[in-house]
Image: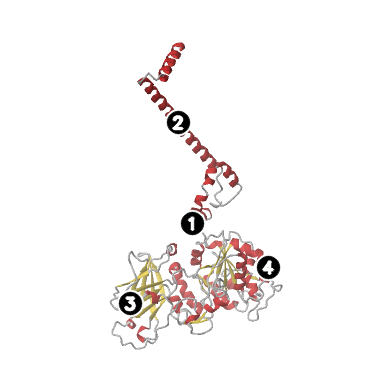
Amino acid sequence: MKVGEKESEKLIWEQMRSPKSGTPIAGGVAVAQSRTLHRLLFLLILFVTVTYVVYTLKLISTSRACHDGPFSTDTHSSSHSKTLPVVNATASSLKFLNATSLTALRRASRETNDGQTELRHVVFGIAASSKLWEQRKNYIKLWYKAKEMRGVVWLDNRVKKDENDNGVLPPVRISGDTSKFSYTNRQGHRSAIRISRIVSETLRLGLKDVRWFVMGDDDTVFVTENLVRILRKYDHNQFYYIGSLSESHLQNIFFSYGMAYGGGGFAISYPLAKALHKMQDRCIQRYPGLYGSDDRMQACMAELGVPLTKEIGFHQYDVYGNLFGLLAAHPVTPLVSLHHLDVVEPIFPNVTRVEALQQLTIPMKLDSAGLMQQSICYDKSKSWTLSVSWGFAVQIFRGVFSPREMEMPSRTFLNWYRRADYTAYAFNTRPVSRNPCQKPFVFYFSKAEYNSTMQKTVTEYERHRVPHPECRWKMADPSSLDKVVIYKKPDPHLWDRAPRRNCCRVLKSKDKGTVVIDVGMCREGEVSEA
């Protein structure tokens, strides 16, 4: 049987080799080529399948711990280069993609691995003076919540303990001795050295689960929810020095446009604080002629190569007089801090400074993200311009003012050198109008509540009754108004979106002495225009 099969195969083979065989030979070649092609396809599929399985197993066996960063380098990198040459071969082509997406990946990694930054991750270091402690501790009580926050007040000398302060204020500590450091500035005070070391001294306390150290003065008031909103934008595992400048152009020239002013507050990430602690004492010795603590801190940041990340919601307020113009036209950013509250007038009339700030905490608790955010709209039937600083004040002007004018602070204040010099500010301002008809009618915040049915806050603003000069314009007179009522839906995610002013709309009112306004996100196609 086997012999017959071999003879048959031999006969076919000879026929295929014979040039005279004609059609049978062509058919045999086609069959052979078809079988060869099938084998090649099968081998190719098998090779791809095996490669995929091996690659997958290798990827699973060498996967990193979830807390490692997406671009962190470790000892596995060398083994990867040997096992997966294709990945390394294409690394250069992905270089541009990695550079542009690095920030987004880091942020996603933080949210996945660590969770977003909360108030419990922040530690406050508060610089205080024993001479002013009894007065200024009341500012700290306005914003510090001992059960929710961590912080330390650093004093130069011991103060008398008050039982009423227990559980209300941060713990008090005495700063370390700085007598070994040289101080040669004749215009300043050597307490600047003590204050400049507060971040390092707070770090040495060894507190756990800290992401940020926030520096402030005893006359600084923080809006802590907005502070956290700002800090969430940044990777606490990187070196960050976050704060803002002075309102005084001359101050910024004299000190630095790259320096965070400590009275307005600044934040330092934990890794940067560790790096600062290692070198700060050596750094301070190199700058005995500097004036204050802030410029010493900035000098050390310069040696570390870390620039200032500017967040203009930190307010130093190097001004005198009335803050109304600044607060009524707050920039489009969260309100983080207020400073120099002993220098400026109370932000609300006819009350003390502390009482005025207590008044501000009412809208702050309802909608901290929207606090003092400006909205500009028009009552076209009366030719009025309305400017809302939510939770603070409403201004009504006769006539039409452009948003470009209204978003500039009016000069209700003097610069740090007590001069009415508009060139001395580090931002644009506008003069207070001399035209008696263009003097604004101001309505200050008086009370607020949350309407659960409407799911909106209802805030009322009462007219500040001061004499107004006579106006001969033949148009509606705002002096007949008593109050303004504003409806606004709380918007905790306001700063998760691109910065934009809220819009306001004048609504119909049944009461002739009341203006009703709706404030909220701008609708599709909505523009502030008369």
Tell me how far mark 1 sits from mark 3, CA to CA: 52 Å
Residue 505 coordinates in the image, percent (x, y): 33, 71
Task: Describe the element under mark 2 as helix, strand or loop.
Answer: helix
Q: Which residue is mark 4?
A: 282
Residue ID for mark 1: 100
Callout 3: helix, strand or loop?
strand
Q: Secondary structure at mark 4?
A: helix
Residue that mark 2 sits on? 40
Of tags 3 and 4, the one toward the viewer is 4
In front of the other: label 2 or label 1? Answer: 2
Residue at 33 percent across and 87 percent down: it is: 471
The answer to whether the residues at label 1 and label 3 have Cβ atoms under 8 Å apart is no
Q: Earlier in the sequence, mark 1 or mark 3?
A: 1
Q: Write the residue at 30% across / 74% down.
A: 509
Q: Amino acid at mark 2?
A: Leu
Q: Position of residue 66 (x, y in %)?
A: 54, 49
- The residue to which callout 3 is attached is 514
**Other residues around mark 4 within 10 Å, as few (<14) / some (14–19) / many (≥20):** few
From what the image shows, is residue 263 above or below residue 473? above
Q: Secondary structure at mark 1?
A: helix
Q: Is residue 382 left or right of residue 202?
A: left
Which corner quadrant of the image does residue 467 belong to?
A: bottom left
**Dot 4 and dot 2 residues touching (CB under 8 Å):** no
Q: How was the colour assigned to the protein in this rendering?
A: secondary structure
Residue 87 left/right relative to 275: left
Question: Where is residue 409 drawn, in percent x and y?
Answer: 44, 77
Marks 3/4: CA–CA distance: 63 Å
Of residues 255 and 436, the one drawn nearer to the viewer in this rendering: 255
Q: CA distance from mark 1 to mark 4?
A: 37 Å
Q: Residues within 10 Å of mark 2 (few under 14, many from 20)?
A: few
